[in-house]
Image (tube, rainbow, N blue to C red):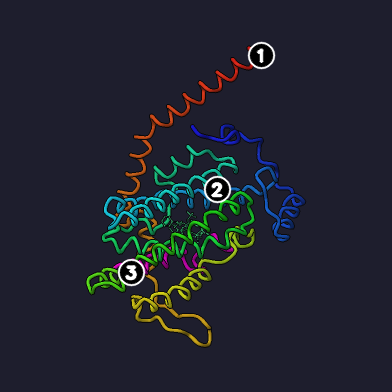
Amino acid sequence: MYTTEMSKNPARPAAPSEAPELVAAFEARVANDEFIEPKDWMPEAYRKTLVRQISQHAHSEVVGMLPEGNWISRAPSLRRKAVLLAKVQDEGGHGLYLYSAAETLGTSRDQMIEALHTGKAKYSTIFNYPTLTWADIGAIGWLVDGAAIMNQVPLQRTSYGPYARAMVRVCKEESFHQRQGFEITMKLAAGTPEQKAMAQDALNRWWWPSIMMFGPPDDNSPNTAQSVRWRIKRETNDELRQKFVDVTVPQAEAIGLTVPDPDLKWNEERGHYDYGAIDWDEFWAVVKGEGPVAKERVKARIDAWEKGAWVREAALAHAAKQASRRQKEAANG
Ligand code: FAQ
């Protein structure tokens, strides 16, 4: 259902043998910063890595609608409600561009959704944490979208054309999301003592999960070296994490909030902030689905898929009716 022509026919011609001259030509194009396009020859391992990363990215966008969607009905004003509604809708759109980009690699939407629902595919750990107060909506926009932009700006130059082009629009929208989150947090931080405490509490809970979003440290990241060589990833997990910390700490200071890391310190020599040890045991536990609301998130996606079956069926029936009408009209001259 809802597949591209290519993905309807997963039996692509047998993978061409990876002749050294094909591999060399592919690598030369990548080194020359040319985009690889869907019909171009590519090594199977490159295709597989892209499907993995792009589909997981798509799942993150769609699962990422849930923590904020939970607050649409409780936003504190009509303006906040309208903005949040638009933001959550944008995330759904990002998921759709990304699923489409992954489909150009020969995988179907159904296969990707099935992988999400059966736990075979991952989505970002960050969405397995609950949104307890309105201040969490500020923290998500400011920190989570902030981290997402830091990761996605370099992906506009990723070597696979459809992924890079999807990222251009995604980044524009994410930067609006980041600002709306920062604005919510800034207003709360300048509000009553209770409001400021809410903002601080949200920062305390979202800081560490946000810096975990960039993935494991480089020396424990099995995919980074090859992905950087193929220019799928343009920067490593630790490089992006450092950039995020460097940009975000002064923002927290500017609005009078404290980053919950006693080891955080500007390092004059490095020209960067040093930060404390990340709890990687927590990260891997959340990756494995042990996050506080992981089961709830996957269940919500499965329920939405099942309850939406009639919409997909109706859309297909409508498309079939239109096609048969067009055929009849063509036959009648
Ligand atoms: N969560 O070898 P690496 C957003 C897995 S979008 C879960 O370093 P890689 C928008 C990783 O998959 C957020 N799993 O892997 C929004 C791998 O397992 P696998 C999503 C993680 O791929 C905002 C294993 O650990 N963004 O937030 C995570 O080279 C607000 C080893 O790791 C993207 O997906 C994690 N955090 O680097 C929406 C960006 N980190 O697959 C709503 C594109 C790592 O081998 C509201 N993706 N793992 O079984 C990437 O840049 C990369 O895939 C990384 C991971 C950096 C996420």
What crowding class fits label 3: few (fewer than 14 Cα within 10 Å), some (14-19), or many (20 or more)? some
- Are circles 2 and 1 on residues that touch, CB within 8 Å? no
Q: Is residue 218 magenta?
A: yes
- What distance separates the C-alpha of mark 2 from that of mark 3? 40 Å
Question: Residue 214: x and y, percent?
Answer: 47, 64
Q: Main secondary structure of the magenta part?
A: helix
Q: Earlier in the sequence, mark 2 or mark 3?
A: 2
Q: Which residue is mark 2?
A: 51
Q: Earlier in the sequence, mark 2 or mark 1?
A: 2
Question: Residue 44: x and y, percent?
Answer: 63, 47
The disc at residue 187 is 3
**Residue that sits furthest to the right in the current view:** 21
Is 239 located above or below residue 21 in the figure? Answer: below
**Residue that sits furthest to the bottom in the current view:** 268
Q: Which residue is mark 1?
A: 333
Q: Amino acid at mark 3?
A: Lys
Q: Secondary structure at mark 2?
A: helix
Question: Disc 2 or disc 1, which is closer to the eye?
Answer: 1
Image quadrant in which the C terminus is located: top right
Q: Amino acid at mark 1?
A: Gly
Q: Amino acid at mark 2?
A: Val
- Magenta part of the protein: which range? 202-225
Question: Residue 59: x and y, percent?
Answer: 44, 49
What crowding class fits label 2: few (fewer than 14 Cα within 10 Å), some (14-19), or many (20 or more)? many
**Residue that sits furthest to the top in the current view:** 332
Left or right, 100 with respect to 332, comes to left
Question: Residue 66: x and y, percent?
Answer: 35, 50
Is 250 located above or below residue 180 in the figure? Answer: below
Question: Disc 2 or disc 3, which is closer to the eye?
Answer: 3
Left or right, 281 with respect to 156, comes to left
Q: Is residue 200 magenta?
A: no
- What distance separates the C-alpha of mark 2 from that of mark 1? 44 Å
